[in-house]
Amino acid sequence: MANAAWRLARRSCPSYLQVLHMNRTAMRASQKDFENAMNQVKLLKKDPGNEVKLKLYALYKQATEGPCNMPKPGVFDLINKAKWDAWNTLGSLPKETARQNYVDLASSLSSSLESSSQVEPGTDRKSTGYETLMVTSEDGITKITLNRPAKKNAINVEMYHEIMRALKAASKDDSSITVLTGNGDYYSSGNDLTNFTDIPPGGVEEKAKNSAILLREFVGCFIDFPKPLIAMVNGPAVGISVTILGLFDAVYASDRATFHTPFSHLGQSPEGCSSYTFLKIMGPAKATEMLVFGKKLTAGEACAQGLVTEVFPDSTFQKEVWTRLKAFAKLPPNAMRISKEVIRNREKEKLHAVNAEECSVLQERWLSDECMNAVVNFLSRKSKL
Ligand SMILES: CCCC/C=C/CC(=O)SCCNC(=O)CCNC(=O)[C@H](O)C(C)(C)COP(=O)(O)OP(=O)(O)OC[C@H]1O[C@@H](n2cnc3c(N)ncnc32)[C@H](O)[C@@H]1OP(=O)(O)O
């Protein structure tokens, strides 16, 4: 119902921007102004963010239905509770005032977001053109570094897109091998759990669908990557940053690294083709311990089970691995690419099918109470891994 209201608030019709600006001078917003403002919201080119969307939702409900007298949603019904809270906060604000406030807010959003969208995209970005990564290329090696150390390199939506972009660029540049690593004490803490809080107008179902599409595309880039792909696991790795290791050609780990796939704890299920690759790499019994029971492996254990190629003392990790990689990068690049093709190509079709199936199972899992509760618990700082 709340989603229906949000959709209604964004229902499409012709642009009335000019009319709206004239009406802003009037004392009270008319029904027509209100409808125009709804259209204005619909036409925004940039997402105004959850806080503003909640405010718009609350004002819309107040303007059309009056004060909130709906029962308060349960504590775990995170999204509907946030909406209820926003509406309830408006107390006994008269319908006309809510309507005027909605019109004013829509108008201010329109001017601030439209003007910021005129700034050249990327003008204040780092020279690499990435917000969440550092990408360098030298000595025949393209190095992609996950660069959100304050968030333990959690992979937010932007980072998923940037990794795909960096991989596509690396597949075409003149380097012969590509390396993925992390900045700071973590390799990566996996999927950024706040990804689940940015709910689109179509509600949680649309969010789950979009996430499954994103995940499938993301994992697909690793399946199809044509050059030798090497992970330098500099510290703990969690979730999807572990599962996709089965798609890498070599995995070098610091002895500080750990490997953790706590999917059951999170009400989720395996991805990154791990339901297939981990079974091949370590056999069903060990794969089950990791993927079903969430057993965390040390670097030594992960190496013994074939997930990691070699473990190095943390103190010499960077020096030793880079020396080795620089030697690899001097090998004839076409021979390496073709050898990878020979080794990997017969599995590609199977991997894409596994990827599709894992994503479709996860799409359902993300809507489960088990998953939503786990995310709420993390966000409310009630649980960590
Ligand atoms: C769309 C495709 C979806 C694909 C799905 C993939 C599935 C997965 O990847 S499942 C794995 C999800 N990851 C987690 O559950 C890890 C959650 N994080 C933690 O349990 C802990 O943060 C930690 C054990 C990794 C580290 O604990 P520590 O005490 O050392 O540090 P913190 O103070 O907790 O973290 C610092 C900072 O970073 C934020 N953060 C860390 N990890 C995540 C994360 N995965 N998502 C969002 N935010 C994360 C943490 O909240 C802290 O932020 P603040 O300083 O702002 O509080």
Image (tube, rainbow, N blue to C red):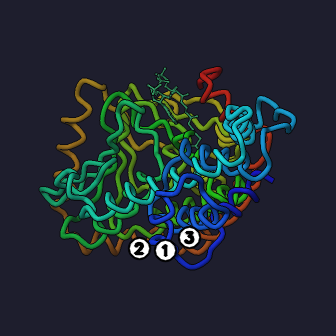
Identify the amino acid type marked 2: Glu
User: x, y (%) of residue 277?
Assistant: 59, 55
SS class, disc 1: helix
336 to the left or right of 6? left
Farthest bottom residue in view? 14
Separation of disc 3 and disc 2 at Cα? Answer: 10 Å
Separation of disc 1 and disc 2 at Cα? Answer: 5 Å
Q: In this figure, which residue is indicated by the disc labeled 2? A: 341
User: x, y (%) of residue 337?
Assistant: 32, 71
Identify the amino acid type marked 1: Asn
Identify the amino acid type marked 3: Glu
Q: Are marks 1 and 2 in contact (CB under 8 Å)?
A: yes
Residue 245 can be seen in this image: no
Q: In this figure, which residue is indicated by the disc labeled 3? A: 347
> Residue at point 67% right, 41% down?
291
Q: Between 358 and 365, which is closer to the camera in this rendering? A: 365
Q: Between 243 and 345, which is closer to the camera in this rendering? A: 243
Q: Dividing the picture into quarters, in which one does residue 273 lie? A: bottom right
Q: Between 45 and 339, which is closer to the camera in this rendering? A: 45
> Which numbered dot is residue 345?
1
183 to the left or right of 36? left
